[in-house]
Structure formats: structure tokens, C-alpha cells
Amino acid sequence: MRIVVAVTLVLVVLAAGWFGWLWWQRAVPQGDPTVLVEMAWEAIDHGNLDEAEQLLTRSLEIARRQGDQQREADVLHRLGLVAETRGDLDEAEKLHNQSLAVSVRSGNRYGEVTSLHELGWLALQVGKAEEAHGFFTHGLTIARKLGDQAWEAACLHGLAWVAIFRGKLDEAEDLCREGLTLAEEADDRYVQGAALNGLATVAGLRGELGEAEDLYRQTLAIAYELDNRACESASLLGLAVVARIRGRLDEAEDLYHQSLAVAREMDDQQWEGASLCGLAMVARTRGKLNQAEDLCTQSLKMARQVSDRLGEAKALHQSGMTAQQRGNLDQAEESYTRSLAISQEVGARCDEARALHQLALLAEDRGDLRGAAQQMEKVLAMMEEIGMREAEEVRGDLDRLRKGPQ
């Protein structure tokens, strides 16, 4: 009897294992790795990261077993994108470097430029603008040798964002326009959308809000056309910024919520944090300081989770403005000082100028009008050099300080 029971148990275990194996065979396609990658890419675009990782891992196993180094590099790159979207930047960097090494070893120049391009974006996200510039420049050199206009445009777009980061708006515009022309010639709608988004950002920073809004709407249309959720979230966020600056707070709040929803569907914590920070600005403008403070806290936490240094600086800046509006000047100063330190560390000149502006206003609140005026002069010179829209506001603040108490 015991033998029968034992045999029965063994058969049950084997059957369970057999049916589990059958489920795996059905759940994860076993065939052509190209099909697996295409399915995974579609899953990434729709934010189904677990499914994408499962498909890509299977494709990687097949590629390595077949000795297909080109496929191996491509799959490693896509696994890096999954890790990047999840906010695991260390894992993403490791995977992209592995992809780069396989491409270099196998002489796969397209694989090289793909990895260099992604490593550039990773470096920029963590505030390493000089390193990002090196990656994008190296990728651009390879793309030009290959005669690939689409990849050339993509690397120019990366260099444009390095220029935006550094506050070099004229250079950024030139790079975006050059990239847009190449993308149009290559009929690459994805890169066209990216270039238009860069131009929209430059226009917004300069205060050319009508042009910025038009460009963001073009970018959003391309995002819908391609079903590109990341581009959709970025475009919605840009339109929200324009609406907020123009005082259309209801519209801005709705757009921020739309951007937030897309970011959460994609499990993209960087865009989620940026959307939360935007909602904090709207809440603070409306005088809802408790809500603004809570949103700032969420945004700051999200930025730190994904090592988004610029996102961290922006969240700290908004936290400072909320504290200053409450009259908590010491807390405000601490937040502005930390935001300033990060902005200076990573070379984000626009955010550096904004932090210095708020510190000058803080000095005014404390009665140090002379110190505030001296600081405001430096801020004005910096913003005028960059070409920022806030320069006019700072000029008004400086005129008020020079007139003294009324």
C-alpha cells in the first residue's frame, strides 16, 4: 500500500512538472528569437515589463546558444531598456555596457551606436553631462561613417539635450533642427518626434509659449500615430507646463494627470516623478499647500529611487517654494540650497539660476535688501546669457529692490 502511495505521489509530481513545462512552452514562445524580440518590443511600448523581460530572456538564451552575437547585443540592449524603465539604472548601465562589448567584439557598428546612444541618456539622467556628451559624440561619429541619417539625427538629439542641460539654448536649437532635417530625410517619425520635442523645450525655456505649444501638439500627434507611450507622456507634460505658465490651471492639472497616468501604465518612475512635481506646482499656485507638500515629497522620493538628479533638484525647488509660501524661511532655504548644490553639481544652468533667484527673494523676505539686490543682479545676468523667459520677472524684482521699501 505504501509503495502504491509513493508511486502515485511520484506520478503526481512528474505530471505537475510536465504540465508546468507545457504551460511554459505555451506562455513563452520557443521559436524564432526575432519574433520573441518583436513581441517584447511591443510589450515594452505598452508598459508590460514583466512580459517583455520574460520574452527577452528566452531570446537571449537562444541567441547565445546559436552563437548569434548581433542578436545577443540587441537583446541585451532591450533588457537594459526594461531595467531603465523600472528605475534600476545600475542594472541598465551594466546591460548596455555588455551589449556594447558584444557589438565591439563582433564588429557590429549598429550595435555600438545603439548602446552608446542609450548610455548617453543614462549618463544625462544621473547628471553626468560631460560623460553623456562623450557617448553621443562617439555614436554620432559611427552613425556618420555608416551613412545612417536616422541614427545621426538621434545622436544629435542627445547632444541637443546636453546643450539644454547646460543652458546653451541656441546650440540646442541648431542641433534639434539639424536632427529634424535628417530624420525627415530618413522618414523616421520616431526621431522626428524627438527633435520636435527638443525644439518645444527650447521655445518654452525662452518664453515662446505659442510656438512651444504648437510643437508639443505635433509631438503628441506623432506619439499617438506610433503608439509611443513615452513620447506621449513627455508631450503631455510639456503641454501641461505651457498651460500652467499661461495661468490655465485647470487645463494644466488635467494634462499633468494624463501624463501621470501614462507614466504609471508604463511603470516609468522618472516621468511619474516629473508629473507629480508639476501637480505640486499647480497645487501651490492655488494655495493648497498641504497637497503641494505631499506631492513634492512623492516626487522627491520617486526621483531619488531612479537616480534622477535633475528631477530631485526640481522637487527640492518646489518644496522650498511651498515652505516659503508658508513662511517657513529656514526650511525653504535648506531646500533651495540643496537644489542649487545638485544643479551646480550636474551643470544644469537653468535650474541653478532658478534656485539662485529664489534665494535672492528669500533674502528680501528676511529684510536683507542689499544682499538680495546683489544676488538678483547675478541671476539676471545669468538668465539673460542663457536666454530664459524668467529674465523679465527677475528684472522686475531687481527694479523693486533698487527702489527700496515703498
Image (tube, rainbow, N blue to C red):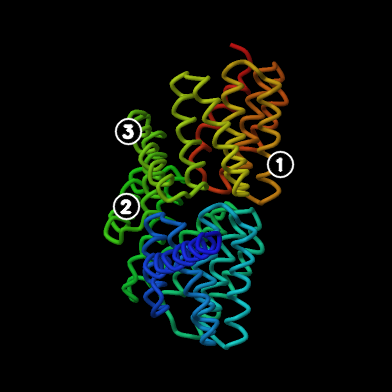
Q: Position of residue 195 (x, y in %)?
A: 41, 61
Q: Position of residue 301 (x, y in %)?
A: 60, 38
Does residue 381 appear in this view?
Answer: no
- Secondary structure state at the residue bearing disc 3: helix
As drawn, the label of residue 80 is: none
Q: Amino acid at mark 2?
A: Leu
Disc with the residue nearer the chain's start (3 vs 1) = 3
The residue carrying pointer 3 sits among few (fewer than 14), some (14 to 19) or many (20 or more) residues within 10 Å by Cα, namely some
Q: Are marks 3 and 1 in contact (CB under 8 Å)?
A: no
- Residue labelled with disc 1: 341
- Residue labelled with disc 3: 251
The front one of 174 and 54 is 54
The front one of 25 and 403 is 25
- Residue labelled with disc 2: 220
Rendering quarter of residue 184: bottom left
Q: Amino acid at mark 3?
A: Glu
Q: Position of residue 88 (x, y in %)?
A: 59, 55
Picture residue at 32% right of the left edge, 33% below the top: 251
